[in-house]
Every structure is written in structure tokens, then in C-alpha cells.
Amino acid sequence: MYNFLIRQNLEESFGDALLEPTIAHHDVLIARLKNGVTLEIRYPDTHEYSILWRWDGAMSVIDTAPIHSDPASFPNHLHDANGVVREDPLTDPAADPWDNVRAVLLAVLSDPKL
């Protein structure tokens, strides 16, 4: 359900930034952006998500897997392009799924390296 709504909002709000239509699989949305970023969005529940992006050979991901308790943003955290786990500056598990995806989209459109 969340993937359908996210896909609809993504294509309506960021259609000009998309390289091609969003690809929807059973558990993931894939969006390829004109700036070279590929996003993989997994949102099985409102407070459980993974938003991964690749750009220029680097990969970063924000997720809510409760295995890294050090960042102040626990349970959500960022695995940056250098593999360092740090505080998530963009999303909030209490926020609407689209608001979180939108925040990541705006950030990676501005600077994929964060």
C-alpha cells in the first residue's frame, strides 16, 4: 500500500527529475533520476523503511533496522558512502512515509553525497 502511494506521489511531484518511469516490484520501488542517482525504496510499514541510493559508484542508505543504537536518531540511521553509520539527518519513523521519501529525494537531487 505505501509503495503505491509513494510511487504516485513521486511521479506526480518529481516527474521532471525522473530519467524513466518508476519501477515497482513486490517489495521495492526503483527510481532512476536524471542526475545519475538510483533510489531503492522499501517501505513495508510506516515506521520500518529502507531508502538506498547509488550515485557515481557510491552507495548510501537510511534505514530503521534496530541494530545500530549509537546514533541519536535511533532506530533510523544513515550508512554513508564511506560505510560509516551516523545519525539520520533526513527522516523520522513517526513521519508520513511520503514526507520521508520526499526529504531524501530533495537531498539527493541537491547533493547525492550528502
Image (cartoon, rainbow, N blue to C red):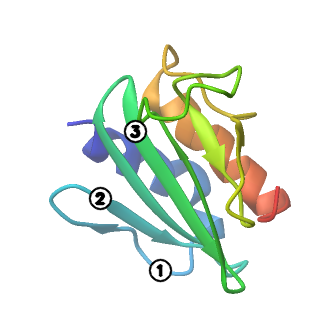
Judging by the rendered image, the residue that carries numbered circle 1 is 20
Instruction: Using the image, tell me which numbered label, if any, was put on residue 46.
Output: none
As helix, strand or loop, the secondary structure at mark 1 comes to: loop
Q: Residue 88: x, y in percent?
A: 69, 35
| Amino acid type for the residue under numbered disc 2 | Val
Q: Residue at x 65, y 68 (%)?
A: 17
Q: Residue at x 75, y 34 (%)?
A: 89
The residue at the far left in this view is 26
Label 1, label 2: how many angstroms apart (C-alpha)?
A: 16 Å
Q: Closer to the camera, 9 or 84?
A: 84
Q: Residue 25: x, y in percent?
A: 20, 65
Mark found first going from the N terminus, 1 or 2 = 1
Label 1, label 3: how many angstroms apart (C-alpha)?
A: 23 Å
Quadrant of the snapshot with the N terminus: top left
Q: Closer to the camera, 101 or 84?
A: 84
Judging by the rendered image, the residue that carries numbered circle 3 is 49
Please state which of the two labelled residues, at mark 1 or mark 3, is closer to the viewer.
3
Judging by the rendered image, the residue that carries numbered circle 2 is 28
Q: Are marks 1 and 2 in contact (CB under 8 Å)?
A: no
